[in-house]
Image (cartoon, rainbow, N blue to C red):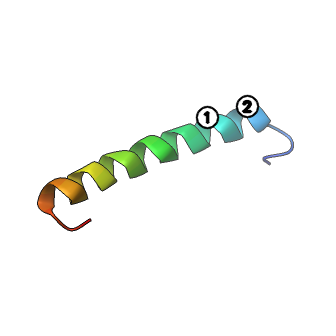
Amino acid sequence: MALAAPKCFNRWRAAICLVFRRLWVKANQRGIG
């Protein structure tokens, strides 16, 4: 799938990165990270 549609894969990866960054920021604000 990634090889067939690299654009979609890149978009997916960007979305995941944004979600993880948001969760990481929340964790740091709580003092977990």
Q: Count all numbered tags in the image, as a single digit.
A: 2
> On the rendered structure, is 12 left or right of 17?
right
At which x and y percent is residue 6? 78, 37
> On the rendered structure, is 31 left or right of 15?
left
Q: Secondary structure at mark 1?
A: helix
At which x and y percent is residue 22? 32, 46
Q: Residue furthest bottom?
A: 32
Amino acid identity at mark 1: Arg
Q: Secondary structure at mark 2?
A: helix
Residue occupying the point 38% across, 47% down: 21
Q: Is residue 5 above or below residue 21?
A: above
Residue occupying the point 80% across, 48% down: 1
Mark 1 closeness class: few <14, some 14–19, many ≥20 residues within 10 Å: few
Residue occupying the point 86% across, 45% down: 3
Q: Residue furthest right?
A: 4
Residue designated by label 1: 11
Determine which quarter of the picture holds residue 27. bottom left
Q: Which mark is on residue 21? A: none
Q: Are marks 1 and 2 in contact (CB under 8 Å)?
A: yes
Amino acid identity at mark 2: Lys
Residue occupying the point 32% across, 54% down: 24
> On the rendered structure, is 33 left or right of 10?
left
At which x and y percent is residue 14? 55, 38
Q: Is residue 15 above or below residue 32?
A: above
Q: Residue furthest left?
A: 30
Residue designated by label 2: 7
Q: Quadrant of the C terminus?
A: bottom left
Q: CA distance from mark 1 to mark 2?
A: 6 Å
Mark 2 closeness class: few <14, some 14–19, many ≥20 residues within 10 Å: few
